[in-house]
Image (spheres, helix red, strand yellow):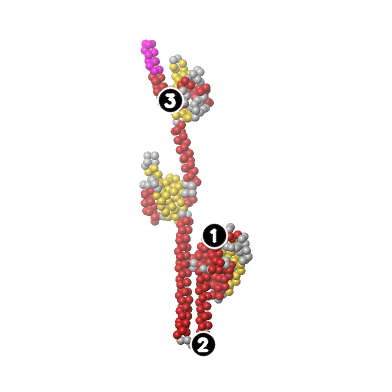
Amino acid sequence: MVQKEEHSHRESEEKFAKAFRCSPQPFTLSTVKEDRYIAVNDAFELKTGYRREEVIGRTVDELGIWVDYAERGKLVEKILRGEPIRNVECRFRKKTGEVFIGLLSAELLELAGEMCVVANVIDITDWRRTEEALRATEKKAALYLQQTMFGVIEWNRDFRVVEWNPAAESIFGYSRSETLGHHAFELIVPPRIVPEIQRVFETAVKRTDGELSVNENIRKNGDTIICEWFNTALTGDNGAVIGIVSLVHDITERKLAEAALANVSRRLIEAQEQERTRIARELHDDIGQRLALLAIELQQLHEDPPDLSQVRSRLGELHKQTSEIANDIQTLSHELHSARLEYLGIVAAVRGFCQEFAEQQKVEIGFQSHDLPSPLSPNTSLCLFRVLQEALHNSAKHSGVRHFEVRLWGTSDEIHLTVKDSGAGFDREAAKTSQGLGLISMEERLRLVKGTLSIDSQPKRGTTIHARVPVGSGADSVRAAG
């Protein structure tokens, strides 16, 4: 009977020893009395970098494999009370000093009459690092969700709101709590385009590469806005589509600006065509007709010459007509391109234009200039000259008076041009929405040189048009009297 029990005991020990050696997880066997290692398996050598002969006979303290000895002391006390340890997360140190995380399991074992502790460790370092990386990624994603300028909205398969970030709150005016669980079409989609948006969402569910669309939406306060949407299908761990993620950008102001720019471009093209029509009409109806009459009179003089005294009189009249035609052609050419502006500068060009315009329109123009930088850049000079032309034409046409004041001067940081009359005045907003293109043309020209246009005008109280252009840092920086 005793021999049978001894045989059975030896078989158990052999099975334990085999399992101990062959286990893919690190195993150790240490004495309770002296806390010395008496056995380690191959997996322990592989994991820690210690060879078996470096470990056997040494104490746990001597080997220094534990990172937190206080934690180990609590676990030893628990084992000595007969309580097994199961999957307790601990930190261990390899021979290289590298720390790894393991799940420790240990319990008491009597071996050859001596109480021992058998322990094994499952390495979970990679798992923990992956978990920490995932948490960091989730934290970054949450931070991006909170701080991004784009609205981020997550919908489930039924198109109900699952997530709604602060930017979406700002765009649509609804707080997150007001939207969670609501259907997309209940809050921000105009009823008349619900079928169209339904098709957009149904397409987005099928496309993980995303789809871009521009839609009309409604804010909480009822305002209509235009938004750019990028919708992409959201998939779960098994690859199945679980909803949609939408990035939303409010492009209302951009669309309004594009429409305004298109309108300005259209009206400027119309203005160009009108100007061409005016020049063509002046050349054909006025100068052309006068040249034709002059040719007829010269032909008559040639075919039927009168006596000498009459010839002299007729030649004098024809000379006068020719001079008037030449002056009018010169005035017209100056409006198209001022040689004075190019060769003599802005002051001479403005003074000359004021004189010619006054003679042509039978009006009076007072011109003053002082403290102009010299030389002005060509772009600035041309801009101010065109603004002057447009302003004087408008004043002569609409003011109802025959006297105007033009001032051109410079300060330390700006160049100023004013055209003033004491005539009928006008309502600026009404003028901007009318068919007149003068104000738009002036504003667009000034915008190109970073200038501004201000208008002080009231019905029956006159008008002052004031153009300002920043002084350049290069050629415009030298000051000279105008």
In-image side of 344 versus 104 (left or right): right
- Is residue 23 among what the camera can see? yes
C-alpha distance separating marks 3 and 2: 135 Å
Q: Earlier in the sequence, mark 3 or mark 1?
A: 3
Crowd rating for badge 1 (residues with CA inside 10 Å; few <14, some 14–19, many 20+): few
C-alpha distance separating marks 3 and 1: 76 Å
- Foreground mark, 2 or 1, reads 2
User: Which residue carries the number 3 mark?
Assistant: 43
The residue at the point 51 percent across, 67 percent down is 438
- Foreground mark, 3 or 2, reads 2
- Is residue 429 among what the camera can see? no
Crowd rating for badge 2 (residues with CA inside 10 Å; few <14, some 14–19, many 20+): few
Q: Nearer the viewer, residue 299 or 48?
A: 299
Q: Main secondary structure of the magenta part?
A: helix
Segment tinted magenta in the rendering:
1-14
Q: State the image coordinates of residue 95 (x, y, percent, origin top left).
A: 49, 26
Q: Quadrant of the C terminus?
A: bottom right
Q: Are marks 3 and 1 in contact (CB under 8 Å)?
A: no
User: Which residue carries the number 1 mark?
Assistant: 450
Q: State the image coordinates of residue 479 (x, y, percent, origin top left).
A: 62, 62
User: Which residue carries the number 2 mark?
Assistant: 308
The residue at the point 52 percent across, 80 percent down is 319
Q: State the image coordinates of residue 322 (x, y, percent, origin top left).
A: 51, 78
Q: Earlier in the sequence, mark 3 or mark 2?
A: 3
Q: Type of residue at label 3? A: Ala
Label 2 secondary element: helix
